[in-house]
Image (tube, grey):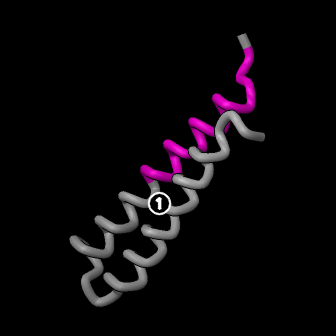
Amino acid sequence: MGMNKNTIFAWASFFMLLIGIALVLLGVLKYQDYAIGFSTVGIGFFVMSWAFNALKGRV
């Protein structure tokens, strides 16, 4: 059983969500001086994850 395009979009969305969460947490907990930058990039990963999830089944 191979992976189809919907499965690939689902996994990509999941991993991008994890990376976004990790970046926001790094900015808030470890690098407070750069929290705005880390959080902005993390939110960008959230948005890309949402877009990948929205593309699932349409491409």
Q: Residue furthest left?
A: 29
Q: Measuring from the top left, give residue 17's x and y in whole percent.
A: 46, 51
Q: Where 25 falls versus 37 (above or below)?
A: above
* Quadrant location of the N terminus in the rendered image: top right
Q: Where 14 falls versus 5 (above or below)?
A: below
Q: Residue at x 48, y 74 (%)?
A: 41
Q: Measuring from the top left, give residue 33's x and y in whole percent.
A: 29, 89
Residue at which label 1 appears: 46
* Quadrant location of the C terminus in the rendered image: top right
Q: Residue furthest top?
A: 1
Residues 55 and 9: in front is 55
Report the magenta residues as a range: 2-18
Left or right of 8? Residue 34 is left
Task: Name the quadrant containing residue 21.
Answer: bottom left
Q: Measuring from the top left, give residue 38's x and y in whole percent.
A: 40, 77
Task: Name the quadrant containing residue 31.
Answer: bottom left
Q: Residue furthest right?
A: 59
Q: Measuring from the top left, give residue 50's x and y in whole percent.
A: 52, 53
Tell me which amino acid carries mark 1. Answer: Phe
Q: Where 9 falls versus 16 (above or below)?
A: above
Q: Is residue 12 magenta?
A: yes
Q: Is residue 48 magenta?
A: no
Left or right of 16? Residue 7 is right
Left or right of 1? Residue 34 is left
